[in-house]
Amino acid sequence: MAAQVTTQFQGIVMYRKDYRERDQLVKFFTREFGKKMFYIRGARKKGFKLAAAILPFTTGTYVGLIKEKGLCYLNAEKTLTQFEQINLDIKKNAYVTYILNLIDSAFPDGDPVPFWYDRVISAMEKIDQGLDAQIITHIFELQLLPVFGVQQEWRGCIVCHRTDLPLDYSESSGGLLCQNHWHLDPKRAHLDQRTVYYLQKLSSVNLDNVRSIGVHHGTKAKLKAVIDLIYQDEVGLSLKSKHFIDTMDSWG
Ligand SMILES: [Zn+2]
C-alpha cells in the first residue's frame, strides 16, 4: 500500500482505551488492512459524532485515513452493525472478547487476513443468535493452532494414518494415535471417542456452514480440558480474557 490512503474499509472494533484527556485509541480489525490502531480525537466528549461507530464489538463499513505505519484516523461511518446479545450477555461478551484477543495474538498488526476477518464476523453473528459460544471458540482455538506454529494431526493416527480404530490424543506425538500405537505414549490423554470425534470435526469445520450446535455438557468439559492443555503447553499463551472465562466457568 501507499504510505497513507483515505479509503473505505470493513472493520470490527477489537478494543479501545482512553488516551489523553478526551481522546481514545481504538484498535480495529479491518478486512483490507489487518489490525490497525486508530487515534480518535474527542472520543470521550459528550455528543461525539462517531460514538456509536466505536462501541465495543461494533462492525461496519467505515471511511478513514489508513497509514502504513503509525496511528490511523476515522472520518466517517457508512453502515454499522451492533450485536445486541453480545453486549447484553456477559458470557457471550467474554467469548467474543477472547476470540478477538486470540486474533490479536495470532497475527501481526497491518497484515491483511480477510479469511479470518470473515470467520470472526460469522462467529459474532452466530454467538449473537445464540449458538454455543464455547464450541465456536473451540473452533477458533483449534483452527488457529497452525498460525501459532503448532501443527496437530487430527485426521487420523499420526503414525499409520488409520481412522478405523479407536483414536486418542497424544501431546508428545502432536496429534492422534490409533489403538495400535497407544504404546508409544504412556501419557496419552485417554479421551472417549465422542471427544475425539469433536476434536476432528471442530478443527476442520467451516464455521459458515454451522447451523446448530448440540454438544453434551460432559463432552464440552473434556474438549476444553484438552484444548486448554495445548494452549498452555504448546502455544504458551495466557490471556486475561481466557482467565475470565475460566473463572466464569467456576461459577457453575
Ligand atoms: Zn496408528
Image: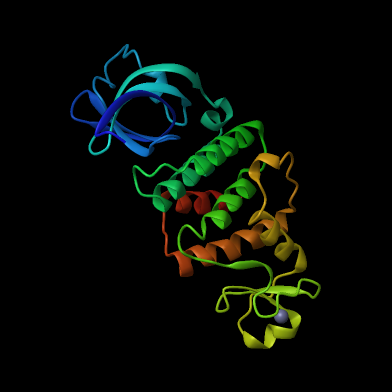
Q: Is residue 121 above or below residue 170?
A: above
Q: Is residue 197 left or right of residue 116?
A: right
Q: Closer to the camera, 142 or 9? A: 9
Residue under the image location 22 percent in, 37 percent down: 70
Residue under the image location 52 percent in, 59 percent down: 145
Q: Is residue 72 left or right of residue 180?
A: left
Q: Is residue 43 visible?
A: yes
Q: Is residue 14 above or below residue 60?
A: below
Q: Closer to the camera, 198 or 205? A: 205
Residue 202 pos. (x, y %)? 66, 54
Residue 252 pos. (x, y %)? 61, 50
Q: Is residue 219 left or right of residue 230?
A: right
- Quadrant of residue 200 within the rendered picture: bottom right
Residue 79 pos. (x, y %)? 48, 17
Q: Is residue 52 above or below residue 90?
A: above
In terms of image quarters, where does ligand 1 lie?
A: bottom right
- Quadrant of residue 142 within the rendered picture: bottom right
User: Which residue extends farthest front?
Assistant: 2
On the rendered image, what quadrant is the N terminus found in? top left
Q: Is residue 39 above or below residue 200?
A: above
Q: Is residue 94 visible?
A: no
User: Which residue extends farthest right?
Assistant: 164
Residue under the image location 42 percent in, 65 percent down: 236
Residue 90 pos. (x, y %)? 53, 37
Q: Closer to the camera, 34 or 26? A: 34
Q: Closer to the camera, 179 or 55? A: 179
